Amino acid sequence: VLDLDAFERNLARMQAAADAAGVALRPHAKAHKCPAIALAQIERGAVGICCQKVSEAVPFVAAGVRDIHVSNEIVAPAKAALLARLALRVRASVCVDDLAQIEVLAAATAAAGSRLDVLVEIDVGQNRCGVATPDAVRRLVDGLSACAGLRFAGLQAYQGSLQHLRGHGERREAAARAADRAVAAVDALAHSGVACPVVTGGGSGSVEFDLGSGVYTEVQPGSYVFMDGDYGRNEYTDALRFEHALFVATTVISTGGGQHEGCIVDAGLKSLAVDSGLPDVWNGEHDYVAVSDEHGTVHPRTPSAARLGLGARLLLVPGHCDPTVNLHDELIGLRGTTVEAIWPIAARGLSR
Amino acid sequence: VLDLDAFERNLARMQAAADAAGVALRPHAKAHKCPAIALAQIERGAVGICCQKVSEAVPFVAAGVRDIHVSNEIVAPAKAALLARLALRVRASVCVDDLAQIEVLAAATAAAGSRLDVLVEIDVGQNRCGVATPDAVRRLVDGLSACAGLRFAGLQAYQGSLQHLRGHGERREAAARAADRAVAAVDALAHSGVACPVVTGGGSGSVEFDLGSGVYTEVQPGSYVFMDGDYGRNEYTDALRFEHALFVATTVISTGGGQHEGCIVDAGLKSLAVDSGLPDVWNGEHDYVAVSDEHGTVHPRTPSAARLGLGARLLLVPGHCDPTVNLHDELIGLRGTTVEAIWPIAARGLSR
């Protein structure tokens, strides 16, 4: 369930912050997998979207999104071929951190007769994808210069693990360390006479700092459209505080014949991702204390909490929005209590 | 990816054990959500299937399954109405643990002109759904006797939490305690002159004990068709040991430009449920040590482990099969290295 008012305020707040900083907003569509949301973001000023897999991009292209960055590395020739075909219809870009990926992309664009922008991913502290040294960046830039269908477009510098540091100060410091590494990479390229038109990265937990860093030309937040329990536990200043807009509706189906302190609801692991913690009950009076595949156990937080009888409905705030949305086929958009939109989550399951 | 040889051996082994015990096998379809698998189970002797939600039953009815037990409580009139309509086409049953659920089911069967078998769920130690006392069972049986479209068919006695006790002995003892509670409920009913044709329950971790308990007339195991990392960590005797048949195939997409000890693969939270632990790498030489939404970090277990270059393929054993299958749209059935079947996971996402 999507609270459309909160959702629209989140979109407006992020776009205004990006506009004020003079930084491009390229929201990450892996959070919502929903073409209607991507189009709403672009309508408000986003330059395009990010996808995390090539297959994920397909429904967005079909829905009319014209500018897609695959913020990830591709190795399989079939996936590179699909991206090269999509690049006949939209502006497309992708990341590399190895010469072998460049070879695969070059062959695919040559076969399709298309062009791809390529960003060299640098590791700015996550220790996941991305190269670590200026020499390694330079080798990839040189490799790209030999490929007719590929153009070096800049750097991707994403630090995922800092997004969830709770304290505002520790998050700011970690974001500054990531930005310093991006600055060093840009400076090293400039020293070699290579311009770096784009530096892209950042997420909903760091975007406040990324926008003011002076090095990012583009930010990639995704979760801000929904928020979730995990991001809700971060400490924010008022500048960029987003609202919970995404909920899973659930129903009390059992009280164990009245034997329980609490009750059993019908949303479990197949309705809610729990990798970042159990969901919060939105009414603030109850706690979701245990999960199984298709059940949850809900307890009153205090003796004065409303007693939940059979059939009672609760809204749950998922611990982690991205994999929760990926469990569902549509978002039910509510304006107050009126269903105003039913949006297909068209890229659900497209994780290849 | 489904290893069809291992899968078929798992089906045969479970059916043979049920046949030897003279107990009906009603596999739980929430594990696989795949009509082709349900039909394969029934072809080998299963009496029907269990579903956990009414919506989940729909694609199985469409595929020709003729006997479905919804092993859960229903409160919403719309869901009861759907089940009552399905009961015009197939033998259908459902659980209750409250008189209010009986009222909803009675109204639905009256409106549809159909009949439902109803099982009273008793709590045998999980403290989730199910009533706790013989008096409570008796009140529900009496409530059912007043409803023309509903027939008391027996008891459901499922203890989910004992399935994952690691030691064979502790699991046997917990299963015995659950069976004792089922026996007590059956005896109390008999003392009141009420026959209890069916006692259904049990899972892949307890089925060995349930089959020999003398009280269960029917068992509901689900995960045995696939097995998973969590069930794999249980201690089994040779009698009912099942094989890993379900895998998620993944590809190495990055080595961080060679900077890492290990490598980055492209299967993360959106391809694998991690509620019961990270996946195991099937080759036995590597460990999947960290997960993010669309990435996993894989390290060599020993210095002699094969070095994984870009493009290397790995098979992963999911920690928990049910919610992992629910992330995917099809099972790719392999006979050795040949794709022999592509089976739609038709009930994926049907969790309402």
Image (cartoon, coloured by chain):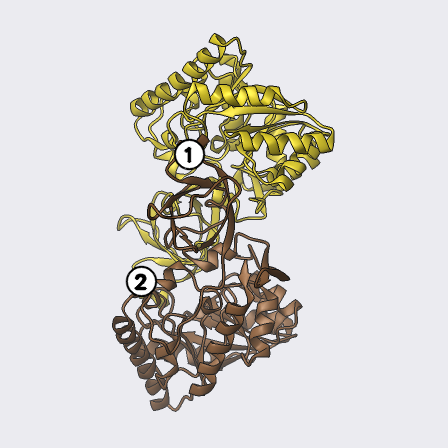
Chain colours: A brown, B yellow
Q: Front-most of B23 and A309?
A: A309
Which corner quadrant of the image does residue A138 belong to?
bottom left
Dot 2 falls on a residue whose secondary structure is: loop
Q: Position of residue A168 (x, y in %)?
A: 29, 72
Q: Position of residue B257 (x, y in %)?
A: 36, 68
> Residue type at mark 1?
Arg
Quick one: label 1 or label 2, which is nearer the N terminus? 1
Dot 1 falls on a residue whose secondary structure is: loop
Q: Is residue B341 above or below residue B250?
A: above
> Residue type at mark 2?
His
Specify the label residue B260 is tagged with.
Answer: 2
Q: Residue at x 65, y 75 (%)?
A: A88
Q: Position of residue A348 (x, y in %)?
A: 56, 57
Q: Front-most of A343 and A63?
A: A343
Asked whether residue B63 appears in the rendered view, the answer is: no
Label 2 resides on the chain identified as: B
Label 1 resides on the chain identified as: B
In the image: residue B238, left or right of residue A334: left
Q: Position of residue B205 (x, y in %)?
A: 40, 28
- Same chain under badges 1 and 2? The reply is yes
Q: Front-most of A346 and A225?
A: A225
Q: Is residue B131 above or below residue A120?
A: above
- Tell me the mark number nearer the camera, choosing from 1 and 2: 1
Asked whether residue B163 appears in the rendered view, the answer is: yes
Specify the label residue A86 is tagged with.
Answer: none
Report which residue position mark 1 lands on: B128
Q: Is residue A299 above or below residue A108?
A: above
